[in-house]
Image (cartoon, rainbow, N blue to C red):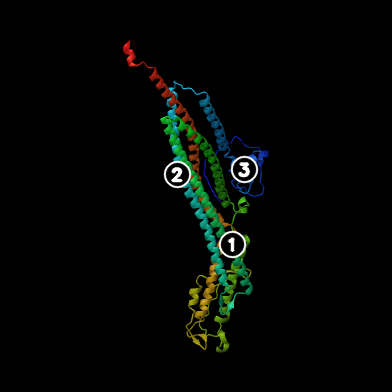
Amino acid sequence: MFVLEGLISLKRSLAEIPSFDNIIVDNNFTFVLAASRTHRQDPFHDFKYYTGGWNISNVHYWTSVSFTAAPLFIIAVIWFLAFGLVLFLISCYYCCCSRRKYSYSRSAYAFSLIFLILFTCAAIIGCIVLFNGQGKFHRSTSNTLDYVVGQADYVVDNLRNFSGILSEAKNISVEQIFIPADIARNIDAVSTKLNSSASELQTRAADNSAKIKDKLATVRLVLIVVAAVMLLLTLLGFYFSVLGQQFLVYILVVIGWVLVAATFILCGVFLIFHNVVADSCVAMQEWVVRPQEHTALDDILPCVDATTANESRYQSKEVTYQLSNVVNEVILNITNKNFPPNAGPLYYNQSGPLVPVLCNPYTKDLNNATCNAGEVVFSNASQVWKNYVCSTAIVSGSEICTSVGRITPKVYNQMISAVSVSGGLEYYGPFLVQLEDCTFVRDTFGTIDENNCPGLNQYSKWIYIGLVMVSSAVMLSLIFWIVYARERQHRANNKHFIALSAPSPLSEKTF
């Protein structure tokens, strides 16, 4: 999502409290996100107040948030039409009624110069604020994007790792005992879904990241160009006005007339983006603290397909349960038995203390189980069982213990492989739960709200302030370019007229 944020917050009048029949009500959700912030008039609904909250899928949300920039668009239109009419009248006057004036007002000349200097300084300051704001805003949005992409990559890596471990469980065997065939088929189905979800998430994250970075680069370029062009226009206009170059001043006035209107429109567009992102930050903050409510975010969040996450978690438990049973079946029925030498492959001269069984973390119905005394767990099974490994030798093609012990090195490695796979599945269990109940997304939103939203608000506010300063200062500078150039020309005409009217020294001597 392309997020631009932080323009000036417009204060709403508390005196104008709308009546209940002047409100748009949206009862599709049990909780309305950012309700107070999005309480705005909707011009597409007879200017009634929109109360559907933050919902980027609702056209009335967009019309209401766009209406906040209406004053700036109106200013742009009024300026373009009114000043265009003024320029037209000035052109007609100079073409039809122009005559040289030899009188001028010293106060008008002085005040026009003072105001021209002030507005030129204001425009320069605005350009500086705009340039610095866009740089910091670009870094803030880039950091936010990098964090979101990093979170997506984290999900992809975990899904693929879990899928790999799950697939590995199919090939695990201890003393030629495998997990049931139907479980293996279920593993294939779940692994396919997981790999598909991971690939889709990775592709979409990469595509969206590239698109957003392109848009951010475009926005940054536009703001830099605006700052540079308006600064150049301001300096040239001041320079030519001071020099009295009326023709060049009027050319710059025409150019500035169009640029000022465009800058006011850009202010309005940026204000819309600001409000959308500010609304989004508030919505994320409220959703984090009330995740159990049904909100507009529920319809667009890519938490993960709940069915796939649930199936994956269920399959993880089932595989862990079956692998634990396979290991315990070998321990109870082979390792801890004292078979006679004629028992065939079941005999390998096992002897000594009995091997403790593995604690199965789940019951038959896959509920959490409690470990019994003497059972080993996934974390210490390898160390405990290592004490029961015997030395072996190959006798008649079979591995036979030549020392006290009940586990051959081959069986030990098979048991540890089963335990490692089960432990890996248990490791990713909480991650799957976080995906299933959107805890992961909620934590991500909480981090963005805490670490990124303040910067987006602050620096985009700088951009808005800079745009307003530049457009307003240049707009007023255009007026005083004309006024000062006119007064300066009148002053020059006056001096020339006085010089021509003064008697020459030669004529005075003749009298």
Q: Nearer the viewer, residue 379 or 232?
A: 232
Report how far apart the C-alphas of labels 2 and 1 lie in the structure.
Answer: 41 Å
**Image disc number at residue 310:** none
Q: Is residue 127 above or below residue 113?
A: below
Q: Is residue 351 above or below residue 486?
A: below
Identify the secondary structure beneath mark 2.
helix
Q: Position of residue 314 (x, y in %)?
A: 61, 66
The picture quadrant where one finds residue 89 is top right
Residue named by callout 2? 132
- Which quadrant of the structure image shows residue 366? bottom right
Q: For the residues marked 2 and 3, what is the alpha-carbon distance in whole angstroms?
A: 31 Å
Q: Position of residue 398 (x, y in %)?
A: 52, 86
The image position of residue 376, as x and y in percent, is 53, 73
**Of marks 2 and 1, which one's residue comes earlier in the chain?**
2
Observer able to see residue 507: yes
Q: Residue at x 45, y 28 (%)?
A: 485
Rendered residue at 51%/48% (across/down)? 218
Q: Earlier in the sequence, mark 2 or mark 3?
A: 3
**Disc 1 marks which residue?**
197
Identified by mark 3, the residue type is Thr
Viewer-closest of 154 and 504: 504
Q: Which comes sooner in the sequence, label 1 or label 3?
A: 3
Tag 3 residue = 63
